[in-house]
Image (cartoon, coloured by chain):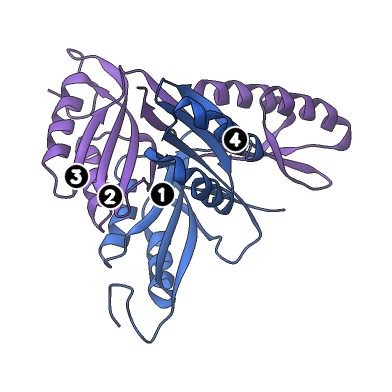
Chain colours: A purple, B blue
Amino acid sequence: MAANGRNENGSIHQYIISVKVENRFGVLARVAGLFSARGYNIDSLAVSATEDDGISVMTIVVKGDDRVIEQVKKQLNKLIDVIKVTDHTESATVQQETVLVKLNAIPKNRAEIYQLCEFFSADIAGISPKTITLSAKGDPDKLDNFIELIKPYGIRELMRTGRISMLKE
Amino acid sequence: MAANGRNENGSIHQYIISVKVENRFGVLARVAGLFSARGYNIDSLAVSATEDDGISVMTIVVKGDDRVIEQVKKQLNKLIDVIKVTDHTESATVQQETVLVKLNAIPKNRAEIYQLCEFFSADIAGISPKTITLSAKGDPDKLDNFIELIKPYGIRELMRTGRISMLKE
């Protein structure tokens, strides 16, 4: 089996894996190392606090071969400091993400940009004579749609947080 | 000099470091490794897409000794696949983050929770007979304040994306 996710016999999917970890140094490097050892690149990663002090959650979005990802999940479970691994790929989830984007915005374009912000419940985070900085929150598809629509105005800088994912009841 | 950020001679601060990287496997593990090798734990990390295909940005929030962080920044700059390291700690920035939180919410508490959502421009992402799931976006201080106010209702599950940070014009 190829180690780089390009195995013709397996199928490549995008996975969303949630890993609850003890908030200790080294755990992030070990988790990241499990993916890079297989030549897998992480599409997005969000690591932050949870309801419990000392516990963090990593939400990993990665494309890979079904069988390789199964192996990685097993190995994640064996890592010291990993409390729980949950695969959110096929589950009913709430997914949210934030984007920050700085646009070229000469005054005559502002009205159109404001209209898009209203439609997407985006906020104006900053404004200068030639630029406007917007922030928007939503599920990743909504944000893709938002970015597509504001792209024609000229994107100077864009960054996304990476998604977080919570299982529905 | 102690390697664990507890050096009495230096001073410990929270840093916000933005690292633009080529989106290749291994770079995340190497960056994480630079911090963990010094016994530094990352408070939050957001890794995701930028305006350029093939380039990701990592926003790292970490507490550490001033001099050790300076070393880490130099070493980050030397890493293969690292394009640019920017320290946002002292700069004028726009910072945004998203939180997802599942609360215990019996019907008689809902009205109060709805009010808080309105005040914080939070959205109701899901509702069940005994729970309510909220999502909110904002700068980290605003989200801390939101979490403090909803805590008394009983938090079942909480996760944050980790902040992203963009320099102002």
Residue labelled with disc 2: A28
Q: Are marks 1 and 4 in contact (CB under 8 Å)?
A: no
Mark nearer the viewer, 2 or 4: 4
Looking at the picture, how far across and down is residue A90, in whole percent? 30, 16
Chain ID for label 1?
B
Chain letter for mark 3, please: A
- Near mark 2 (Cα within 10 A), the count class, few <14, some 14-19 or many ≥20, is many
Q: What chain is tagged by disc 4?
A: B
Tell me whether marks 4 and 3 sit on the same chain.
no
Gap in Å between the C-alphas at discs 4 and 3? Answer: 33 Å
Residue A100 or B49: which is nearer the viewer? A100
Disc 2/disc 4 C-alpha distance (Å): 33 Å
Q: Secondary structure at mark 1?
A: strand
The disc, 1 or 4, on the residue closer to the chain's N-terminal end is 1
Q: Indicate the quadrant containing the N terminus of chain B: top left, top right, bottom left or bottom right.
A: bottom left
User: In this rendering, does residue B161 appear at all?
Assistant: no
Establish whether labels 1 and 4 are both on one chain.
yes
Q: Position of residue B80 (x, y in %)?
A: 36, 52
The three-letter code of the residue at mark 2 reads: Leu
Q: Is residue A169 left or right of residue A26?
A: right
Task: Please report contact status of discs 3 and 1: CB closer than 8 Å, yes or no.
Answer: no
Q: Which mark is residue B45?
A: 1
Q: Which mark is residue A82?
A: 3
Cα–Cα span, label 1 and label 4: 26 Å
* Secondary structure found at label 4: helix
- Which amino acid type corresponds to the residue marked 3 in the rendered image? Val
* Left or right of B79, for residue B111: right
Q: Are marks 1 and 2 in contact (CB under 8 Å)?
A: yes
Picture quadrant of residue B91:
bottom right
Q: Which residue is mark 4?
A: B117
Looking at marks 2 and 3 on the same chain, the residue that comes earlier in the sequence is marked by 2
